[in-house]
Amino acid sequence: MQIYKFGGASVKDAAAVKNVTGILNENNFNEKVVVISAMGKTTNDLEKVVNLYYGGNEAWQQTLETVFEKHLAVMRELYHNGGFDKAVADIRLLINGAAKFLTENTSRNYNYIYDQVVSIGEYISTTIVSDYANSIGLQNTLLNVKQVLFTDNAYTEGKVDFKKTEDAIQEKVNELVQTGFVITQGFVGCTPEGFATTLGREGSDYTASIFAYSLNAERMTVWKDVEGIMNADPKEFPDAQLLSEITYHEAIEMTYYGASVIHPKTIKPIQNKNIPLEVRSFVHSGKRGSVISANANINFLPPIVIFKRGQVLLSFSAKDFSFIAEDHLSKVFGTFAENRLRINMMQNAAISFSIAVDFKKEKIENAMNQLMDDFSITRNDHLSLLTIRHYNQGIIDKLTHGKDILLRQLSRTTMQVLMRE
């Protein structure tokens, strides 16, 4: 059993869909689960639908119809020998279902609405790829991930019930792979009540690792538009180097600090069962790419540079002018946990405590409102968090020269700087 994951860029148009089916055909597509993200920028388009709807703007209907039109154009390019009408009908059903939900919805819970609407992007893409693959003789079954991946009710950041999920995946997939490979949706889970949840942006990697863990897979492969895992974002650093192999621990550190090549939660499930993870290019599918495993040689790693933009620095000081002590920290941490705000950097001083988090407007404002009675709070927006693993002074000087630095931290292997964008 192998698990393949294809992101949005790998299925962005008709040529990309044909490329994906070509990769599956070349790599013995049987005994595989293929996890697929929404096509191209569909998630962004569906977010616009949600935001228009939530703001009371009837333009959400036309925006949703535009999502259908974009996918219709892809299907027109794909089909020349039958199958077009079925594919269009399948996608029309998904679009109409989202429109019906929004028309009848009475909830004002933004995150709930978001998950019900945005999740259809994955259902559209997997339906198109599955229908097309079957039409060219690549026999597969489309599995509704909500039948096997179960979460709590934390909309937009669903927490997976691993035991229930593992049992369901084993039962369902082991039956389905007898007649071909399985295609399913990334990013999406199911609440106990049967509603859609999502696992966080770029959560399809995590979905694939959950399937790999549950099925004791031989290998998991993430197909991307880059050669493999690089020591920096090649879009910003043209001289970025390929890391042909890294350990699970190094990969976890990189994703924790914000490296975008793999979703942060992806590594741990496969590490628990020692399942290697490959990152390969769907553009140059014959190249080996990078491998994440337990026994990788990392003695000669170059500095690894990670930029995390859109950061907010919140600094807390007690209103009674007392020192910041354990009771204060407990209250701050508890509030952040309640609001599901992940801390990217923190620093403690005698009378203040500073935290850097991703810009999540509603969650930050809720947390600040909960803490404002006990703390004086200052806030700085539009910041970037620079992390350098295996740093040297030359790379630090190069990337921080002339910058307005608000926080700096240094350990034996990692340097972090929070600075203005």
Image (cartoon, helix red, strand yellow):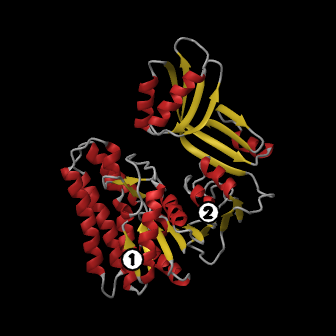
107 sits left or right of 168 in the view: left
Residue that numbered label 2 is attached to: 273
Indicate the amino acid at tag 2: Lys
Residue furthest toward the left?
Answer: 104
The residue mark sitting in front, 1 or 2, is 2
Indicate the amino acid at tag 1: Thr
Find residue 231 and report its horizontal and vertical position in percent: 69, 56
Find residue 230 and report its horizontal and vertical position in percent: 66, 60
Q: Can residue 421 be seen in this view?
A: no
- Snapshot quadrant of residue 65: bottom left
Q: Is residue 129 visible?
A: yes
Residue that numbered label 1 is attached to: 141
- Snapshot quadrant of residue 370: top left
Q: Which residue is drawn at 67% across and 44% down?
A: 387
Q: Is mark 1 on a helix, strand or loop?
A: strand
Q: Which residue is drawn at 53% across and 31% down?
A: 333
Q: Which residue is drawn at 66% across and 36% down?
A: 403
Find residue 58 and report its horizontal and vertical position in percent: 21, 49
Of the image marks 1 and 2, the number of the one nearer the N terminus: 1
